[in-house]
Amino acid sequence: MAVIHILKTFPYEVSIEEIETLNLSQYRQALSGMNLIIYIVRQNTLYIHIIIDNET
């Protein structure tokens, strides 16, 4: 997944709008093709919590 390499370099450059509405502002999200990646950044480590298939 190319987006993982982007997150590694720029972990704060992605949208958090939908997650903020759930009062989960420490989490971030990124799209990779048809997948939604939910992750968190702590110090110098990026933790992926879930990868969701976004196909309808």
Image: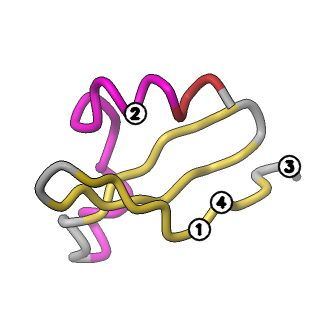
**Which residue is outermost to the front?**
44
Closer to the chain start, of discs 2 and 1, is 2
**Which residue is tagged 2?**
7
Q: Mark number for residue 27?
A: none
Q: Is residue 50 above or below residue 1?
A: below
CA gap between label 3 and label 2 equals 22 Å
Q: Contact (CB < 8 A) between labels 1 and 4?
A: yes
**Which residue is tagged 1?**
50
Q: Contact (CB < 8 A) between labels 3 and 2?
A: no
Callout 3: SS: loop
Query: Pointer 3: residues within 10 angstroms few (<14), some, or many (20+)?
Result: few
**Which residue is tagged 4?**
51
CA gap between label 1 and label 3 equals 15 Å
Closer to the chain start, of discs 2 and 4, is 2
Q: Is residue 36 above or below residue 21?
A: above
**Which residue is tagged 3?**
55
* Residue at the (55%, 28%) spot, across then down: 3
Q: Amino acid at mark 4?
A: Ile
Image side of residue 27 versus residue 6, left or right: left
